[in-house]
Image: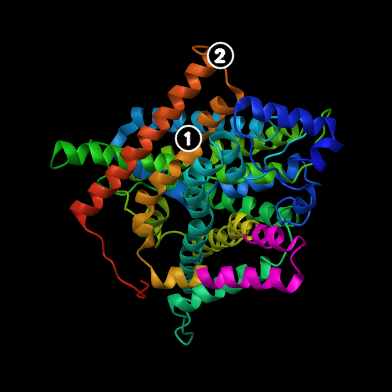
């Protein structure tokens, strides 16, 4: 593969290593990497990694955690939350180590690592849809949540003024999308580190505000922690699967960890996994301090009275009248800001993928006007989907069950395929067990989502936002 391999002894070692593991795939041209938004700047550090990981690792899905405890109860809820937290932290560590699994080679994209581990065709089949959904699908959801939260913020602040007419939901979607497109003009992943810092602070603040207010305020009458009986054994099993899905979906961002690490400088003496792991350890310490109190405190405050919208809906329902409008408005504003900042980091793999196709064909970087046009087009496309398919969040459990493998299963299997640990060794046994368990859990969550849709139905309406 040549000129590159013959020019570098380190690259020869890398090629030999990949031949040994049986998956010699196309290498990224270093010049092309310098043209793409993820790897265009490699001046990142542990602080930037912490900002990006924290911003992408906390989402509004975390506000649904108390709902999982209604089905699982105190003991199994805490156990499940703790086990999933440790599991996904372990798979994060695997991905960070696999970023440079051979000397002189870097896998700065999840899809590229999947192709290196499973082969070009199978790797693309397994990882392309989940990673693109976790990027594009998340951006669509962020438009829905961010636009709706902007509307709530406006109504909260201007509730006393009857002369002010609020915008419609679609118009708030437009406000959010235009704001996101403007911020998306920043050129690369490193350049949005400041935006990720703002998003991290916003996420930590609204999570903390939500559970602290819920715990401090007097609990509503009729709070109960008794197990909710279902109509059948199948319904009970599906409820458990859905509860586990809520816990698993609260942890996200694995599809971005390789990309974040790709923004860091690396050498044989100073590999990028060292500062990356430092940043991840710090960010996930903060995430744990947010999610565990949110789940436990929210369930303690509302018990089985928790509405389907999660703890934020419970706060508005039970304490909307006796809580300061300033606090409620601030919480809504922080959620909107976090959605806006998260949009940037989740959209970056899509921008990178599109520009990669151009640079591969033209052998030159994207001109500024094309880069701008692609990002405007992506914003318009996600806006159109959010308006055309307002029922898309109802399918989150179904599609999320498929994408779950990116977080819990594939990293373990890729470690086995690339590192080839000795058979029956602790590493071999642990990774095979977790990988297969992740695949089984994914299938069960998809089954639970299908059963829920089949039994409870789904309100399918096109171009009718609520």
Q: Measuring from the top left, give residue 331's x and y in whole percent.
A: 52, 59
Q: Which residues are magenta?
A: 354-381
Which of the marked residues, 1 or 2, is nearer the chain's N terminus?
Answer: 1
**Mark 2 secondary-structure assignment:** loop
Q: Which mark is residue 185?
A: none
Which is more toward the observer, 76 or 400?
400
Q: Quadrant of the C terminus?
A: bottom left
> Distance from label 1 to label 2 (Cα)?
22 Å
Determine whether the residue tagged by mark 1 lies in a helix, strand or loop.
helix
Residue 374 in the image: above or below residue 253: below
Badge 2 is on which residue? 422
Q: Which residue is mark 1?
A: 408
Give the image location of residue 152, x and y in percent: 46, 69
Let me know if residue 257 is in the magenta part. Answer: no
**Residue 247 on image: x %, y %:** 41, 40
Q: Is residue 294 above or below residue 132?
A: above
């Amino acid at each position: 593969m040549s000129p590159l391999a013959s020019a570098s002894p380190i690259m020869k070692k890398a090629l030999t290593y990949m031949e040994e593991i049986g998956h010699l795939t196309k290498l990224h041209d270093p010049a092309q990497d310098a043209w793409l938004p993820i790897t265009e700047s490699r001046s990142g550090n542990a602080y930037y990694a912490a900002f990006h990981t924290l911003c992408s690792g906390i989402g509004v899905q975390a506000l649904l955690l108390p709902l999982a405890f209604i089905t699982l109860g105190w003991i199994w809820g805490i156990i499940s939350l703790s086990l999933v937290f440790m599991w996904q932290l372990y798979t994060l560590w695997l991905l960070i180590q696999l970023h440079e699994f051979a000397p002189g080679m870097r896998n700065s994209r999840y899809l590229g690592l999947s192709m290196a581990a499973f082969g070009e065709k199978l790797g693309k089949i397994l990882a392309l849809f989940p990673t693109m959904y976790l990027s594009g699908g998340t951006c669509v959801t962020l438009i829905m949540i961010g636009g709706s939260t902007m509307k709530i913020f406006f109504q909260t602040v201007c509730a006393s003024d009857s002369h002010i007419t609020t915008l419609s939901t679609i118009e708030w979607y437009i406000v959010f999308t235009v704001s996101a497109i403007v911020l998306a003009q920043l050129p690369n992943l490193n350049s949005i580190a400041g935006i990720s810092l703002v998003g991290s602070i916003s996420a930590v603040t609204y999570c903390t505000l939500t559970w602290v207010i819920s715990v401090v305020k007097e609990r509503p009458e009729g709070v109960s922690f008794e197990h909710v009986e279902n109509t059948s054994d199948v319904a009970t099993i599906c409820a458990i699967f859905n509860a586990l899905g809520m816990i698993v979906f609260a942890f996200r961002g694995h599809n971005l960890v390789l990309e974040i690490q790709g923004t860091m400088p690396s050498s044989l003496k100073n590999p990028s996994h060292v500062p990356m792991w430092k940043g991840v350890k710090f960010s996930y310490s903060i995430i744990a301090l947010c999610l565990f109190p949110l789940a436990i405190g929210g369930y303690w405050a509302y018990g089985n009275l928790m509405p389907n919208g999660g703890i934020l809906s419970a706060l508005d329902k039970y304490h909307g009248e006796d809580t300061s409008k300033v606090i409620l408005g601030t919480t809504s504003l922080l959620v909107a800001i976090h959605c806006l900042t998260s949009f940037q980091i989740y959209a970056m793999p899509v921008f990178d993928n599109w520009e990669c196709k151009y640079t591969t064909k033209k052998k030159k970087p994207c001109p500024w006007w094309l880069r701008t046009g692609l990002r405007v087009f992506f914003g318009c496309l996600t806006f159109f989907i959010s308006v055309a398919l307002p029922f898309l969040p109802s399918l989150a459990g179904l599609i999320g069950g498929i994408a779950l493998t990116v977080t819990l299963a594939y990293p373990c299997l890729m470690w086995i395929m690339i590192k080839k640990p000795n058979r029956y060794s602790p590493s071999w046994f642990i990774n095979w067990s977790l990988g297969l368990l992740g695949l089984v859990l994914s299938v069960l969550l998809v089954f639970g989502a299908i059963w829920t849709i089949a039994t409870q139905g789904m309100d399918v309406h096109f171009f009718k936002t609520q």
